[in-house]
Amino acid sequence: MSDSGGTFDLVILGGGSGGYAAALRAAELGMSVALIEKDKVGGTCLHYGCIPTKALLHAAEVADSSRESETFGVKSTFEGIDMAGVNAYREKIIAGPYKGLSGLIKSRGITTVEGHGTLTAPNQVTVDGTVYEGRNILLATGSKTKTIGLDIDGTRLIDSEQALRLDYVPKSAIVLGGGVIGVEFASVWRSFGAEVTIVEALPHLLPSEDEDSSKLLERAFRKRGIKFELGTPFESHKITDSGVSVTLQGGKTLEADVMLVAVGRGPVSEGLGYEEQGISLDRGFVLVDENLHTGVGNIYAVGDLTPGPQLAHVGFGEGIFVAEQIAGLNPVPIDYDGVPRVTYSDPEVASVGLTSKVAQERGYETEEYTFNLAGLGKARILNTQGALKMISAKDGPILGVHVVGSRVGDLITEGQLLYNWEALPSEVAQLIHPHPSMSEAMGEAALALTGKPLHTHD
């Protein structure tokens, strides 16, 4: 007979970005909450994804800065990468937020349960024989790296979690997959001194971004000596004495010390009782309506487990949404086009809203303007290149902002507001941006779309 772990207003399976955000908001709204997590609260983003990879990317930026310091009249010498030091820095970065999050969850009176949970009824989750009943259930079990049937041995073939923990810099690396994860690791390893080749089956790096952004990134990577094979699918590999040999369709072969398999992430839904309770799945993803409800009982699902964008901040927003939905606050459904997307490579690629292609597919008559960052004093100071593209409906609001360059991940927040508040280019053109700053690119693009360009560098 199963033990009873009690009855709660909300039982959450998974303590990643979506799960813990829902737990915190629900507790704030006066609900009793049980949060079940088999590993550590914080999930992939905090422990194996966003936070540690960005720590590596910052270390890479420091390495590049020390190499290039004479450009700025500063004499320094680059002596190499100390991976033990880099890894210690990375772990320190994770430790602070993990401790803070654990304390916050405890302070809100949330019941945390360590263990592997399974959905055993529409209103209950069982963990090691103990049943936790929920008036509402939230599935937030996240995602795992896809391996496409390859034998990830952790030595020659590695996934992104193993790549994070490498204690050496490979002399050469093949990155299978030109999406966000592949591009970010390629950028890090190149800064650390490796020879890198990206293999991407689709025609461009970051294929979900606006094509112009992808082309700018490819140009920048070429300049940095990062090689890539585009529109050429991977066919096979073999482990050699010195590393790995990869054959592409068409017969071309590549050799390297290691191959990173970065072909995306798939949902963690197998063997958790979802289908047995009548929940609809598509390729393992849990299907939900605009209110993130599964259609079964009071069961909701959020984050990488669902077919939406696989972004930690999306899971976070969805978790808050579900807590407020359960509380009867009638939150506004999330507009996923209005969520900013950032790839933290060098250069960074950031976007929000529609790409040119999607805007046209949706029947918009569009106007667009691309402002070259070379026209900005701040971009020259930072010694960065790139461009900002602003797309608007003809005589209508801004539909998308796409930008490539140094630190543009921080710049896209303004684009997020412009898209979500349906701002007209003429309204943005009236705003005075601080000078010198990267944000001036927004004002310049809006001025151009309004028919009064100030600084143009074509």
Image: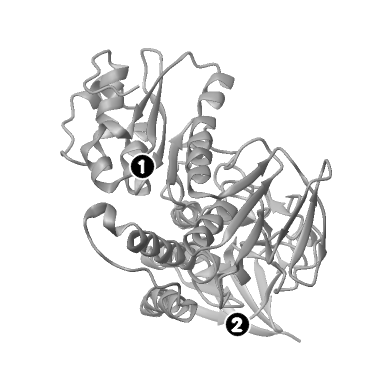
Dot 1 corresponds to which residue? 412
Q: Nearer the viewer, mark 1 or mark 2?
A: 1
Density class for disc 2 (Cα within 10 Å; few <14, some 14-19, many ≥20) is some
Dot 2 corresponds to which residue? 5
Q: Is residue 327 left or right of residue 414?
A: right
| Residue 368, x across and y down, in percent | 41, 20
Residue sitting nearer the eye, 155 or 286 = 155
**What residue sits 36% from the left and 61% below the top?**
67
Local SS, label 1 = helix
Name the amino acid type tagged 1.
Ile
**What residue sits 30% from the left and 39% below the top?**
414
Local SS, label 2 = strand
Q: Is residue 342 visible?
A: yes
Image quarter of the N terminus: bottom right
Q: Gap in Å between the C-alphas at discs 1 and 2?
A: 45 Å
Upstream in sequence: badge 1 or badge 2: 2
User: Does 185 appear above or below 438?
Assistant: below
